[in-house]
Image (cartoon, rainbow, N blue to C red):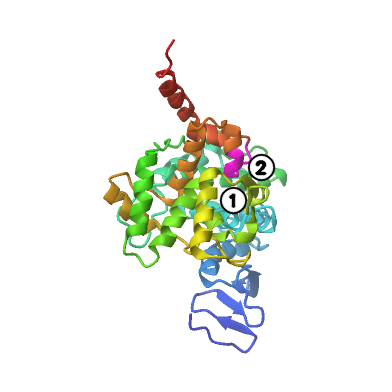
Amino acid sequence: MGAAKSRNGWLTSGVTNLVRDRREGTYYARVKVNGQQRYLSLETNVFSVAKLRLADAESEMRASSPSRIPGGRNSENAVGRFIGAYLERTRLDISLAPNTRLRREITVKAIVKTWAELPGRDAGKVTPADCLSWAARAFTEGTGFVAPNARTIRRGMSVSAYNKCVDVLRAIFEIAREEGAVYKNPTASLSKRAPRRKRLDLPSSAQFEALVGTVAATRARRSRDCADMVRFLAFSGARLREATAIRWGDFDFARKRLKIAGTKSDSSDRIIPIFPPLAALVAEMQARRGAEPAESRVLRVQECLGVLKSACRRVGVKALTHHDLRHLFATSCIESGVDVPTVSRWLGHSDGGALAMKTYGHLRQEHSDTQAAKVRI
């Protein structure tokens, strides 16, 4: 980063308006507003995260200034002030997982990117038509962001990103309504877009066994550990970051239980049974690796995507992701006769099974039809 110490205790970062506290290591946005230097903590000591939050912090600091904004509107009712309030509530909400906070900050940035004049608008003068116009433009044109090394360039927003923008924009104007800046939330007329339901093209049991064998037999440096990860994800239903955080001390072998620390939210923390396939895998790993301390991580690799996709090509099945192995777990449970609400709890959902039913509900009917064909009177 090449930071250099300044006289007043701040470290420069090489990025305009981004400085770091020399003692605490925390990054701050430094903006001159009405001739005065103002600082706002970005609440992180990670340079990449600080850069991501900087633009929002600059907008918040300028919008909260008592000066009049362009167009003669008093900033007391400027949308930028309510954007700042929304971000502040997000940062102070201890029930939110760090990833959720970051995702909301990214969404705010996307909204401002696609509606540049919004922070300076008088909230009371933003109309439903304005919101509908933004929605059409944002969805079809997007932010213009292209990921490094992207093989394909998407024009417009994905359905998921667009729906997140609608939620956040609605929440911002709800704050404005609470504070009396608007009488009615102008985003009420916005509708979310229905996501395309992903077709679950998952391997059969025989194909999965062949897949695991192929992963283990590759010349990758930690092929056996990668094969362990593939089976662990498919046999536990854990998300990737949940699985990589599991330690031997999280297993209660006497009660046949496994504690999983959720990564989506506090409510995704859960205790699941040690299912028979998972029990067999764990026993095999322990026999192969010997006794390990309780604080040791069960999985020795953090990801296996490259090896997994290569193995899929060799076996002749559709390329799988880490998350597809979670789908495979849920599908196997449902096809084994487990009810959807129970599978939902094992997955760490807190909605009583609504999401699982939407994602996997059709499998119940397909499985029922298959089983019905076997009936003989």
**Residue 304 locus on image (x, y percent):** 41, 58
Q: Is residue 93 above or below residue 364?
A: below
Task: Write the residue at 55% across / 68% down.
Answer: 50
| Magenta span of residues | 344-351
**Residue 170 locus on image (x, y percent):** 59, 43
Residue sitting at the far bottom = 7
Question: Which residue position is annotated with label 2?
Answer: 182
Residue 277 magenta-highlighted: no
Mark pair 2, 1: CA separation: 33 Å
Amino acid on which disc 2 is placed:
Val
Q: Nearer the viewer, residue 53 or 262?
A: 262
Looking at the rendering, in which quadrant would you find the C terminus?
Answer: top left
Task: Write the residue at 34% across / 64% down.
Answer: 220
Residue sitting at the far top = 377
Question: Which residue position is annotated with label 1?
Answer: 264
On screen, residue 125 versus residue 220, left or right, reads: right
Amino acid on which disc 1 is placed:
Lys
Residue 243 tag number: none
**The quarter of the displayed image where residue 91 is located:** bottom right
